[in-house]
Amino acid sequence: MLHKQLQFSSFFLTAEAAPNVRKDFIFACFFIYATRFFFFTLQAMQTTYNFDKVVDRRGTNALKTDALRARYGAEDLLPLWVADMDFETPPFIVEALCARMEHPIFGYTQTPPGYWPAIIGWLAERHGWEVKREWLCYIPGIVTGIGLALNVLTEAGDKVIIQPPVYHPFRLVPEANGRAVAYNPLRLAGDRYEMDFEQLEQLIDERCKLLILANPHNPGGVVWRRETLAQLADVCARHRLTVIADEIHADMALHGSRHVPFASVSEAAAQGSITFNAPSKTFNIAGLKSSFAVVPSAALRARFYAWLRANELNEPTIPAAVATEAAYTHGREWLRQMLAYVEGNIAYVEQLLAERLPAIRAMRPQASFLVWLDCRKLGLDHAALLDLFVNRAKLALNDGEMFGPGGEGFMRINVGTPRCVLKQAMTQLANAVVNG
Ligand SMILES: Cc1ncc(COP(=O)(O)O)c(C=O)c1O
């Protein structure tokens, strides 16, 4: 024993004994690491998360439940509108937050050392996108980020292109900032949206400075193909348009689809874009403001990031940093199970519509928990459609018109909710349509 100890300590003391002992030491380290990795992976895989659990959000100031009267004029509605989920935020995030909250001082805090590696690791592993640390910067929300980028990169009167029907702040933020919005409406080809490049070329003039892209698309749930993104990058590069790629739904590709980061498709895309992403939708932490930007172009960084730094907008709050690191470090298995559950919910909606409401068709999303319902065959105008959903079916959904041209006659339902709630909602809808 003593002999062994002496031999081991010689690892540190003498050069001659070193090679063999060092091999043993490396092997021992590897063994311990591999065992721990195996153990934690097994533990994560054995955890079955419960997405059936109904959590009452009323009284927490949740927008989805507590703003019903203000938005819909009634409180007795099933709320399937705001794009957050009704599933509990995963326990590993709640535990990380609680552990930090136990310390009673919330003073000025530096960004934790594991924060950036967690983001870089996640983008590489999940999306095959190798980003450099200097490309990244925190931003306090994606809609906020769009507003900030807009103010830095454009002037009053400049034009911003969007492709409706699309997430409505893409229109609201530029308009509220005195920029003009130019529409390049998506084309419906069968049951899929496509970008209209001919129309886009005709639309662009010298006042157009930015194009805001939802990748994947909300509300249509489209995972844009690499060729489409590359073509968009070419057009924008030729006309010196900067693309803001909002990739907040990126982690939630469904049914075997795979998200393609816009900036990864070509050099033109990388050099002409600002990407926004976040763990907020994926892990249900939208209230924590946990987003970040990715800008490969040094020239764009010199304008945008320098301005963010000058105004001290570039540092995550304590909860944002803690939750992001926990999400991207421990989130794989939870996400896998959550997406499988959402796919089950989508299948349920499709089945119910086929059996009881063939006049409404669900556009199957390739990503995320929002389902775009084509209600045009009901033959109702906007007011009558709202009356059906709100007053008769008692549902709070997003109406298609709010997403701009092309949204007329559609409704968006959020299926990030326990199945029993979804079943209740779909039954109410079916009864309202069938019973008139
Ligand atoms: C495409 C898209 N971008 C941005 C957001 C909101 O992001 P944030 O809460 O970070 O402003 C949403 C939320 O629904 C969204 O769907």
Image: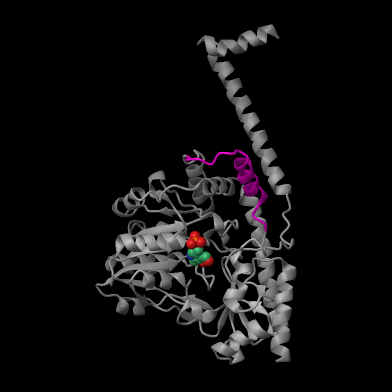
Q: Compared with residue 167, is residue 279 higher up or lower down, i.e. above or below? A: above
Q: Residue at x 47, y 73 (%)?
A: 166
What residue do we see at 68% from left, 80% from top?
394
Residue 101 is inside the magenta segment:
yes
Left or right of residue 159: residue 50: right
Say if residue 262 shows up in the picture: no
Residue drawn at point x = 59 percent, y = 66 percent: 63
- Where is residue 246 drawn, in percent x and y? 45, 63
State the quadrant of the C terminus.
Answer: bottom right
Q: Is residue 140 above or below residue 367?
A: above
Number of labels in the image equals 0
The magenta stretch is 88-109
Mark yes or no: residue 6 visible.
yes
Which quadrant holds the N terminus?
Answer: top right
Q: In the picture provided, is 288 more to the left or to the right than 173?
A: right
Residue 23, image x, y percentages: 57, 21
